[in-house]
């Protein structure tokens, strides 16, 4: 089907971009550095480690979504290469949806890679003493560095020997090898003894990572909608604006909409469309719940997932409408 062919091409095009692999590497380095940065607090260092890690995932996801979406659609429109696709029996809605599916798959792959590094960091925790066994989690360091090094070397050899694109091979290899590293450290404790993997499983952290991914997918849909009409820089600014407004909409707009008594009618009427249209990213922000010990239930995850699905459908619907009348010739 043309839809899946477009999605596959968009996925490969996304993970082959140099900026994609650069942002993934920067995210990995930031997550590693968070283990040391979280030590400079008078409170619980490991809570700050979780907060910093989720913030890093959120910010990297925003940048990846904006840069990737603009590259796969805006660049094709500017270069007129999209004309060769829409001139064939491929509908414009299929092109937009296929591009989004490809971008979403690439973002999910990057998020998986960064999530594995985040899980390794959470398992390692902030160093708590001068003794090596207390300061460092040696299984995390050994398996993490070994698997990451093998992925990097393998991508380099594939590029040198078989002319495979380094960025795409690196991203896929890193996601696979770091998954192996996480699986190994879940089976081995800090003293190199075998343990039940279920002891290392934290369902709350997994739910938190899922919520961040859903937020990134919503931002990717917004980026696709913006890139149908805007150039790369305005699209980046639009995504940043939605990101910032989405973070504060619950505080500034939700208080007006949900508690209209005593407020001017015109103010409530003006806030309603913005509050309903802009994604409320506070629904996807799990750091407060994790650090304060509030359990996130499967029902909450299902409700937020449904909300994310509605936002994605709305953004893609807007993207289709904007692209339907776009002159690409």
Image (cartoon, helix red, strand yellow):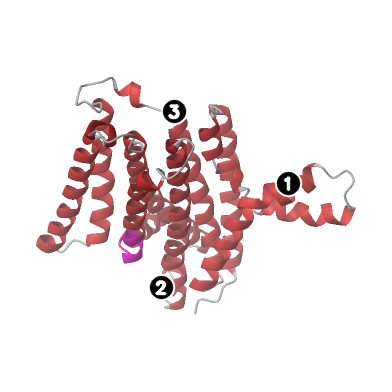
- Horizontal side of residue 175 vs 77, given as left or right: left
> In the rendered image, is residue 89 in sight?
no
Q: Which mark is residue 203?
A: 3
* Relative image position of residue 119 (x, y in whole percent): 35, 38
Crowdedness near tag 1: few (<14), some (14–19) or many (≥20) residues, C-alpha within 10 Å: some
Magenta-drawn stretch, dominant element (helix, strand or loop): helix
Dot placed on the residue nearer the N-terminal end, 1 or 2: 2
Q: Measured along the vertical axis of the image, is residue 235 above or below residue 11?
A: below
Q: How many marks?
A: 3
Gap between marks 1 and 2, in whole Å? 45 Å
Q: Is residue 19 magenta?
A: yes
Q: Nearer the viewer, residue 36 or 186?
A: 36
Q: Which mark is residue 254?
A: 1
The quadrant where residue 125 appears: top left
* Relative image position of residue 145 (x, y in whole percent): 21, 45
The quadrant where residue 195 appears: top left
């Amino acid at each position: 089907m043309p839809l899946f062919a477009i999605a596959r091409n968009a996925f490969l095009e996304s993970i082959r971009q140099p900026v994609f692999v650069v942002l993934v590497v920067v995210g990995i380095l930031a997550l590693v550095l968070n283990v040391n940065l979280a030590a400079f607090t008078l409170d619980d260092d490991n809570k700050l480690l979780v907060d910093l890690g989720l913030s890093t995932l959120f910010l990297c996801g925003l940048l990846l979504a904006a840069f990737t979406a603009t590259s796969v659609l805006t660049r094709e429109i500017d270069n007129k290469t999209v004309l060769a696709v829409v001139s064939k029996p491929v509908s414009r809605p299929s092109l937009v949806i296929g591009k989004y599916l490809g971008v979403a798959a690439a973002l999910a792959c990057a998020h998986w890679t960064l999530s594995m590094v985040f899980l390794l960091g959470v398992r390692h925790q902030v160093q708590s003493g001068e003794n090596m066994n207390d300061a460092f989690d040696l299984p995390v360091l050994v398996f993490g560095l070994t698997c990451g090094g093998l992925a990097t070397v393998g991508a380099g050899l594939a590029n040198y020997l078989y002319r495979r694109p380094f960025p795409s091979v690196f991203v896929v290899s890193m996601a696979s090898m770091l998954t192996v590293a996480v699986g190994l450290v879940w089976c081995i404790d800090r003293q190199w003894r075998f343990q039940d993997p279920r002891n290392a499983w934290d369902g709350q952290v997994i739910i938190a990572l899922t919520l961040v991914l859903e937020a990134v997918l919503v931002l990717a849909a917004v980026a696709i909608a913006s890139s149908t009409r805007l150039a790369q820089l305005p699209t980046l600014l639009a995504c940043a604006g939605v990101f910032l407004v989405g973070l504060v909409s619950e505080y500034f707009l939700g208080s007006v909409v949900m508690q209209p008594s005593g407020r001017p009618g015109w103010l409530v009427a003006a806030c309603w469309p913005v509050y309903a249209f802009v994604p409320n990213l506070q629904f996807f922000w799990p750091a407060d719940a994790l650090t304060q010990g509030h359990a996130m239930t499967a029902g909450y995850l299902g409700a937020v997932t449904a909300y994310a699905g509605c936002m994605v459908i709305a953004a893609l619907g807007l993207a289709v409408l904007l692209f339907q009348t776009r002159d690409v010739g």
